[in-house]
Amino acid sequence: MNDFSNYQITDGARFRTVGDEGVFVLLGSSEVLVINGSAAVAVDALKRGRSPVNAVVESFAIDIETARADLAQLFTQLVEAGALTSA
């Protein structure tokens, strides 16, 4: 069962919630990544040391299996972009 606790925001990235979206600034490349509201809820939970899966399930009408599958895909993309890292 993956709770995604092994992920963290990279040292070279900054994350903020702006309105209903999330924004990553990748310091090394000056690139900006904008993520939707459900992704922002997950990343904000991760940043605060909470379970991203639980945060998404509690905030949206989604079952836990779907949340895990969606977050696995999202976090893989954010690792590839240089916004997140996994231990």
Image (cartoon, helix red, strand yellow):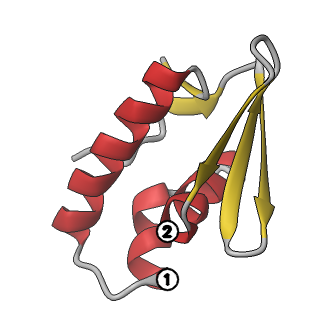
Tell me where residue 12 appears, x and y as whole percent: 77, 17
Is 75 left or right of 82, judged from the image as shown?
left
Counting from the top left corner in percent of width and height, residue 25 is at: 78, 34
> How many marks can you see?
2
Horizontal side, residue 46 vs residue 2: left or right: right
In this rendering, would 26 be left or right of 87?
right
Question: In the rendered image, which residue does mark 2 sit on?
Answer: 38
**Residue sticking out furthest to the left:** 65
Q: Residues within 10 Å of mark 2 (few under 14, many from 20)?
A: some
In this view, the residue farthest toward the top is 28
Counting other residues with Cα less than 10 Å from the Cα at mark 1, is it few (<14), some (14-19), or many (20 or more)? Answer: few
* Label number found at residue 46: none
Task: Give residue 13's position: percent from left, percent from top.
Answer: 75, 27
Q: Amino acid at mark 1?
A: Ser
Residue at (80%, 22%) from the top-left corner?
A: 30
What percent of the width, then of the height, locates residue 29? 75, 14
**First reached walking from the N terminus: tag 1 or tag 2:** 2
SS at mark 1? Answer: helix
**Quarter of image, res 33:** top right
In the image, which disc is placed on residue 59? Answer: 1
Task: State the residue lying farthest toward the bottom.
Answer: 61
Q: Residue placed at 76% from the left, 18% from the top?
A: 11
User: Is residue 37 depicted above or below 84 in this figure?
Assistant: below
State how far apart marks 1 and 2 are (Cα).
Answer: 8 Å
| Residue type at tag 2 | Ser
Q: Give me the residue at 58% from left, 20% from top.
A: 82
